[in-house]
């Protein structure tokens, strides 16, 4: 390992220990490397900016962020909650099952686990607490179910992965559908076990005549995923254009149909979305600098040679990567793994003939599990901050949900068709 690379990694560790924002930490580390190598900072900055400006697919990220913010601002969360309650509320532990179903539905609108937890997740926690569920159980379940958000399309992490890997965004979106549903089924089985053991209550019975009204109130948001995927695969619009359709559709529902969006709230959404988008852009730009350094030091080639020397099978490689990401996910931000580690692993994955869509979905699920895993599970901290739920209590309750999500991860790793069947049905056949 060269001295320049040691400087970069050392600065990255220091900034992580100091808890600096990850974007600034990567930027400081990258600039330290460039200064140590006496390279032209302006030239590298120009290359980074060109990479950002020439990446048409990145336009989808701020648009999906905006769509999620609009959906959270209106009455969509409450409508989805009522819709899910009508479907599964009468089961034992009905509100816990509702929590999961709402996450599945909302995942088709936001593409963000944080948006899911901060919007309908908080509504679910409050409703569960009112009906006798412990705050810790409700918080842990909400954190776990929110991981479905970036797996079922649209998905911000999969958009960024597509930018890094060159994989088809549309195929990645389709590839996430069945794994996302598998995660939901795994969580519902866990809830069923807990509900039977703790004798959790059933939801209140809903009058038969109320069903049409409840279903009608929730049906419009449900059409968004159909519009997005249908538009992409009929060629009406590209995945990036689909993000603008999602933003426009969300705005139409919240402002015109539901009349739940004031001008003041619209301005606040623009500010919030701009800040979140700027944060993501800073992280991506900083990651470009890190990747520039790794490429200059031939890190991907060295890692590929090392892994090739281990003579791993494709499945062995995927299992090794899963273990690596699960361990690092307990400590590192998702952005580092997605933007820095994935490019290092791609040459070996391609050499072994691993389908990049399969790899992308598996890694996305892996990174989402990391958002719930102590000690730095981001979703646990979000719920702790927004709902005031005990962090220690949530961690205690979360292990069962983490366990079933790991089982789902292993299944989709060992059986690639869980990911690839739907893309193949729609004509995707590349590596």
Image (cartoon, rainbow, N blue to C red):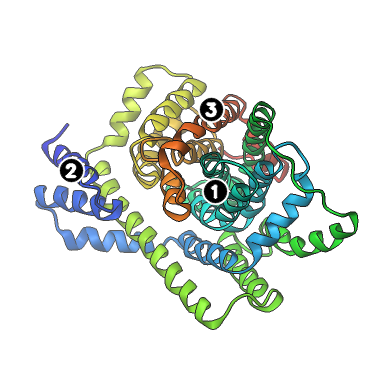
Which comes sooner in the sequence, label 2 or label 3?
2
Residue ID for mark 3: 403
Q: Earlier in the sequence, mark 1 or mark 3?
A: 1
Residue at the farthest right position: 209
The image position of residue 244, as x and y in percent, is: 57, 68
Pointers 2 and 1 in contact (CB under 8 A)? no
Tell which of 94 and 245 is nearer to you. Answer: 94
Specify which label sits upstream in the sequence, 2 or 1: 2
Residue 284, image quadrant: bottom left
- Mark nearer the viewer, 1 or 3: 3
Determine crowd level at label 1: few under 14, some 14-19, many 20+ residues with C-alpha closer than 10 A: many
Residue 424 visible somewhere in the drawing: yes
Q: Secondary structure at mark 3?
A: helix
**In this rendering, position of residue 295 left or right of residue 358:** left
Give the label on residue 150, or none: 1
Residue count near mark 3 (Cα–Cα under 10 Å), binned few <14, some 14–19, many ≥20: some
Query: Distance from label 2 to label 1 (Cα)?
Result: 30 Å
Residue 202, percent across and down?
74, 41
The N terminus, quarter of image: top left
In the rendered image, residue 415, in percent from the top left (x then y), is placed at 62, 26
Give above or below for 125 relative to 407.
below
Estimate the spatial distance between the alpha carbons at disc 2 and disc 3, rounded to whole Å: 32 Å
Q: Which residue occupies 26% across, 63% down?
A: 46
220 sits left or right of 254 in the view: right
Element type at mark 2: helix
User: Which residue appears at 64% of the width and 39% of the height?
Assistant: 429
Q: Nearer the viewer, residue 253 or 292?
A: 253
The answer to whether 215 is drawn above or below residue 97 in the figure is below
The residue indicated by pointer 2 is: 14
């Amino acid at each position: 390992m060269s001295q320049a690379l040691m400087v970069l990694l050392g600065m990255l560790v220091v900034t992580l220990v100091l808890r600096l924002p990850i974007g600034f930490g990567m930027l400081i580390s990258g600039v330290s490397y460039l200064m140590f190598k006496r390279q032209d900072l302006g030239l590298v900055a120009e290359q980074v900016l060109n990479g950002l400006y020439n990446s048409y697919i990145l336009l989808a990220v701020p648009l999906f962020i905006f769509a999620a913010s609009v959906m959270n601002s209106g009455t969509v969360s409450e409508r989805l909650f009522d819709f899910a309650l009508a479907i599964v509320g009468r089961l034992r532990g009905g509100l816990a099952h509702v929590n999961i179903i709402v996450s599945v539905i909302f995942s088709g609108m936001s593409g963000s686990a944080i948006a899911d937890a901060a919007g309908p997740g908080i509504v679910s926690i409050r409703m569960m607490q009112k009906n006798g569920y412990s705050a810790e159980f409700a918080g842990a379940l909400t954190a776990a179910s929110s991981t479905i958000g970036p797996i079922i399309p649209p998905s911000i992490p999969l958009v960024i992965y597509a930018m890094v890997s060159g994989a088809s965004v549309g195929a990645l979106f389709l590839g996430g559908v069945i794994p996302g549903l598998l995660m939901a089924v795994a969580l519902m089985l866990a809830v069923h076990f807990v509900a039977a053991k703790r004798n959790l209550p059933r939801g209140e019975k809903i009058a038969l005549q109320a069903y049409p009204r409840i279903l009608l109130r929730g049906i419009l948001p449900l059409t968004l995923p159909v519009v997005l995927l249908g538009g992409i695969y009929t060629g009406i619009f590209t995945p990036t254009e689909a993000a603008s359709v999602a933003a426009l559709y969300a705005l139409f529902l919240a402002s015109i149909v539901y009349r739940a969006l004031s001008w003041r709230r619209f301005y606040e959404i623009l500010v919030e979305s701009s800040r979140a988008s700027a944060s993501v852009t800073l992280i991506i730009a900083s990651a470009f600098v890190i990747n520039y350094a790794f490429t200059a030091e031939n890190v991907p080639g060295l890692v590929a040679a090392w892994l090739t020397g281990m003579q791993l099978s494709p499945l062995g490689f995927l299992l090794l990567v899963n273990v690596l990401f699960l361990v690092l996910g307990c400590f590192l931000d998702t952005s580092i793994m997605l933007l820095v580690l994935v490019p290092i692993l791609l040459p070996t994955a391609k050499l072994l003939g691993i389908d990049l869509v399969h790899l992308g979905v598996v890694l996305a699920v892996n990174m989402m599990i990391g958002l719930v895993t102590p000690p730095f599970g981001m979703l646990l901290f979000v719920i702790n901050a927004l709902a005031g739920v005990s962090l220690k209590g949530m961690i205690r309750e979360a292990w069962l949900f983490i366990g079933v999500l790991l089982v789902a991860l292993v299944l989709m790793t060992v059986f690639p068709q869980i990911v690839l069947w739907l893309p193949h049905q729609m004509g995707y056949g590349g590596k």
